[in-house]
Amino acid sequence: MTPRTLYQKLVDSHTVARLDEQNVLLFCDLHLMNEYTSPQAFAGLHEKGRGVPMPGQNVAVVSHVIPTEPGTIRVIRDAAPALQASNLKKNCERHAIPLFDTNDMLQGIEHVVAPEHGMIRPGMVVICGDSHTTTYGALGALGFGIGTSEVEHVLATQTLVYRLAQDMRIRIDGTLPVGTTAKDLVLMVIGQIGAQGARGHVIEFCGTALDALSIEARFTVCNMAVEAGARGALIAPDAKARQYVLERAPDIEGSVRDAALAHWDTLFSDEGAPFHIEHCFDASDVAPHVTWGTSPDQVVRIDGRIPEPDDQPAGPLRRSTEQALRYTGLAAGAAIEGTPIQHVFIGSCTNARIEDLRAVARVVEGRQVASGVRAMVVPGSGAVKHMAEQEGIAKILQDAGFEWRAPGCSMCLAMNGDILEAGVRCASTTNRNFEGRQGRGAITHLMSPAMAAAAALTGAITDVRRLESAHA
């Protein structure tokens, strides 16, 4: 039998029909929806008089437009976002689709909510009208984002016309040094291969460094694979992944559990399976990383310097460097460490899980946010928020001067009330630093939760290892 990659196995097991050499009709085990990419899809469905034949394999979450101000009752005050949320509720009620609504205690960011409730299992195909659906590869599920017209097709048929991707393998061996995290690891990889380095490919991450990561850390890696242009990301499910799922999926028991475990044991790339591109990295070389520009691949080590445009090859790369420097107001050749910041945002589908908040609490406990800095923490879900409050994390953060807010996408993107003003420089745990991403004219520096915490305490981009060693 011809050796197959994990990606090929997942596609083959979900192919309803082969359409041509490049396209298949793919069955989708789970379709996640949010309030901003589903309205047109439902409208198209209703115009054609179609229903949703498999409502239980669709789940909706209000996440992007919801305000995160603390309070018992959450109200979306802006008319357009409020209409999006109310339409989602009406459409879900009409078609019997489960919904984590605005004031559901378990509401949150779709990519945090779904795995924490056991909805994501190894071997699944999971789709959503959001590019960071690649997150689910951490559990050995093929996740990817789709467009509005595709959302309509999935609602009507539970299938998708899918263009096949190529295979890429990224092997990372070695041990991450103390003070570095999965966020630093993936930022390093993106910086090395570029924002288009995985274009047209599904990445399979492997190696001893990946084996050592927790599942929540693997979510971070797979979440940001799309920032290298990847159409998907996968990590073969191991004992950690199986345990994570079984602890959150009480329906998997008895003979169903036996069958599931037997299937999950087959989810790996066969020896000799062909990959179109392969990269290898050493985790022991990784330092804390920070973006300096307006693309996630414009990134340097914390002890590095901002690139000189003249050091880049003439053409698009040099022009993008020049434009990024104009936008961020940074000086070519300057050290990134010590750059003053005015805002800190800890949240998003990349870094708003309980493990992330524990890391922040370890850095800030007994310390204070610097004068002139506004620091916000937005948990990824109601469940994460509750856990952090029960563990005392929320109190540590509030005592240090952080705002403790309600769950949602928040300041990851300027689609809600959490928007930065022009010229404000933000240390952010999000996944994108595009121009205007957090507000028109605002400047975003991507980094790990621990690094963002260090920036909040010092008022500048700071090597967190200095603070951690002082705490030791």
Image (cartoon, rainbow, N blue to C red):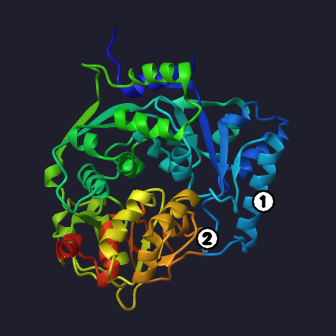
Closest to the observer, 390 or 154 = 390
Measured Cα–Cα span from mark 1 to mark 2: 16 Å
Q: Is 205 positioned to the left or the right of 429 in the image?
A: left
Instruction: Quarter of the image for the N terminus: give it.
Output: top left
Q: Quarter-wise, where is residue 423 in the image?
A: bottom left
Closest to the observer, 302 or 371 = 371
59 up-or-down from 316: above or below: above
Instruction: Quarter of the image for the C terminus: give it.
Output: bottom left
Q: Position of residue 126 (x, y in %)?
A: 54, 37
Q: Which mark is residue 314?
A: none
43 up-or-down from 48: above or below: below
**What amino acid does circle 1 point to?**
Ser
Residue at the far top in the pictured view: 1
Q: Which residue does the image show at 19% across and 70% down from the upper left?
A: 465
Q: Quarter-wise, where is residue 323 in the image?
A: bottom left
Q: Position of residue 57 (x, y in %)?
A: 66, 35
Label 1: few (<14), some (14–19) or many (≥20) C-alpha neighbours in 10 Å: some
Q: Is 54 positioned to the left or the right of 142 in the image?
A: right
Q: Which mark is residue 416?
A: 2
Can residue 350 be spotted in the picture? yes
Q: Secondary structure at mark 1?
A: helix
Can residue 235 be spotted in the picture? no
**What amino acid does circle 2 point to?**
Asn
Q: Which residue is mark 1?
A: 86
Q: Secondary structure at mark 2?
A: loop
